[in-house]
Image (spheres, coloured by chain):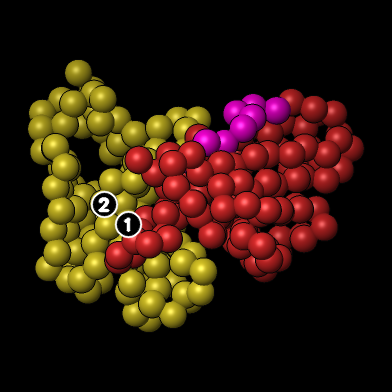
Chain colours: A yellow, B red
Amino acid sequence: EDQVTQSPEALRLQEGESSSLNCSYTVSGLRGLFWYRQDPGKGPEFLFTLYSAGEEKEKERLKATLTKKESFLHITAPKPEDSATYLCAVQAIETSGSRLTFGEGTQLTVNP
Amino acid sequence: GAVVSQHPSRVICKSGTSVKIECRSLDFQATTMFWYRQFPKKSLMLMATSNEGSKATYEQGVEKDKFLINHASLTLSTLTVTSAHPEDSSFYICSARDQLGQQGNQPQHFGDGTRLSIL
């Protein structure tokens, strides 16, 4: 069974204080790992897809990296508008219908 | 691109009422759409996979007769919560993938969810 564990559950940062969120996963064969951002009362917003170990992707203050067991979402010099819940999800190679398995998310709060 | 619209955003109704939620892909066609349920401060739980022109595939433990799914076109899927009760109150979110004619593994794009409250 595919499993995704995210840590920490919650993270409070001061504006400009860089940090990383962790996503550990267990999957028989990884087709893709996805990062989403979710604001309160909204649906998840797609950020990145990572396919293979060693891959990195960046978007503004966010950088996602991938190893064979985990992914990190690095946040550089965060701003209050980066406050949200960040969700990680995996899709297994043999999964039918492209279903995703989600972690429980990391709730990030960036204080001004 | 890849916008998914979900309607309504919030529903409050009496116990026993049936509620229909619509999920539309606005600028792409989706042969597959997904329906999730999310509890407060919890992650998304996949309820069912909606396939255009065929029956939906439900996850274990999800009642087919309770949560009726119809995917009649490449841009519209509906979820009907039949005879809703207070325990059905939740945040329901749909997603869709723009896979037709696309290279690679396209991500799921999500609607903004429907907050369902059953009194």
B27 with respect to A61 (left or right):
right
Q: Quadrant of the C terminus of chain B?
A: top right
Q: Main secondary structure of the magenta part?
A: strand
Is A80 inside the magenta-drawn segment? no
Identify the residue at image location x=62%, y=52%. Answer: B73
Cα–Cα span, label 1 and label 2:
6 Å
Q: Is residue B65 visible?
A: yes
For mark 2, does the 10 Å Cα neighbourhood hold few (<14), some (14 to 19), or many (20 or more) residues?
A: many
Mark 1 neighbour class, 10 Å CA radius: few under 14, some 14 to 19, many 20 or more: many
For the residue marked with disc 1, what is the amino acid?
Answer: Phe
What x and y, as percent, mark residue A52? 20, 71
* Number of marks in picture: 2
Q: Is residue A72 left or right of residue B99?
A: left
* Residue where numbered disc 1 is placed: A34
Classify B37 as above or below A94. Answer: above
Q: Position of residue B46 (x, y in %)?
A: 57, 57
**Secondary structure found at label 1:** strand
Locate residue B39: give its quadrant: top right
Q: Kindly indicate whether the residue at mark 2 contacts the one at mark 1 (C-beta within 8 angstroms).
A: yes
Q: Report the span colored magenta.
A: B4-11
The residue beneath circle 2 is A48
Which chain is mark 1 on? Answer: A
Report in which chain the residue with disc 2 lies. A
Looking at the image, residue A95 sits to the left or right of residue A112; the answer is: right
Residue type at mark 2? Phe
Measuring from the top left, give residue B51's x and y in whole percent. Answer: 61, 62
**Residue B14 is drawn in which quadrant?**
top right
Tell me the residue at 26%/51% (across/down). A48
